[in-house]
Image (cartoon, rainbow, N blue to C red):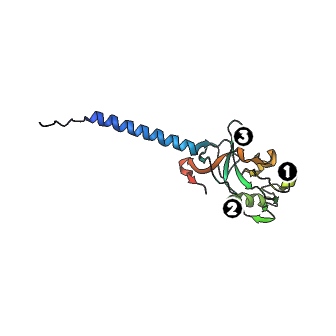
Amino acid sequence: MKRKKRKISFVYELKLFSVVLVTTLVAVLILFSLFYSLKIVSGYGMMPSLRDKDVLVVKRISDIKRFDIVFLNKKSKGEFRRIIGLPGETIVFEDDILLVNHEPIDEKYLVDKINENQAKGKNFTEDFDLFGLQSLNEIPTGYYLVLGDNRPYTNDSRDYGLISEDMIGGKAIMRLWPIERAEQFF
């Protein structure tokens, strides 16, 4: 006795493909959301590096290093700021020079803005030190000093103090939008 092969219709194959595709996409999105999130920049505190309405990918769990751009779980929307001081360090800004443990560190991402302001006879970043901000000699364990890139016009650790590690919602790793400015952050 011969068995007849059952013909699978094109419509059935299309439905099966659609179910597999949708299931796969849902699984990928769930996995993505466990480790990453999408955040929209609100305001101009990180100009010129980030602009209002930029869309960034934020990695939730990550090692924090100096100059990383982090998302702070602050206010209702949160905000992006740059890590400047790490636990155990002393921080001083003097004549637009960042001194970490008394050693000068270049802020290459701000060179143009610093030079522009100094040509006008102004500092881009007002002089300050950690002791003047928080009456501390060094940043305590579990805390960071953050600054906005738009130093003359932004609120940051100079205004609200050091931020605790649990306030950091993640590290920006990529700009997705606008597409012409898409880039990875290292």
Residue depth check, mark 1 versus mark 2: number of the one nearer the observer: 1
Are dots 1 and 2 in contact, CB under 8 Å?
A: no
Residue 108 circle label: 2
Q: Which is nearer the N-term, disc 3 or disc 2?
A: 3
Residue 76 visible at all: yes
Q: Residue at x 81, y 46 (%)?
A: 159
Residue underneath mark 1:
133
Q: Residue at x 47, y 40 (%)?
A: 27
Label 1 amino acid?
Leu
Gap between marks 1 and 3 measured at Cα: 19 Å
Q: Is residue 62 left or right of residue 20?
A: right
Figure quadrant of the N terminus: top left
Counting other residues with Cα less than 10 Å from the Cα at mark 2, is it few (<14), some (14-19), or many (20 or more)?
A: few
Gap between marks 3 and 2 measured at Cα: 27 Å
Label 3 amino acid?
Lys
Question: Residue 10, position in %: x, y?
Answer: 27, 36
* SS at mark 1 in the image: helix
Q: Which is nearer the N-term, disc 1 or disc 3?
A: 3
* SS at mark 2 in the image: helix
Q: Is residue 185 left or right of residue 44?
A: left
Residue 74 circle label: 3
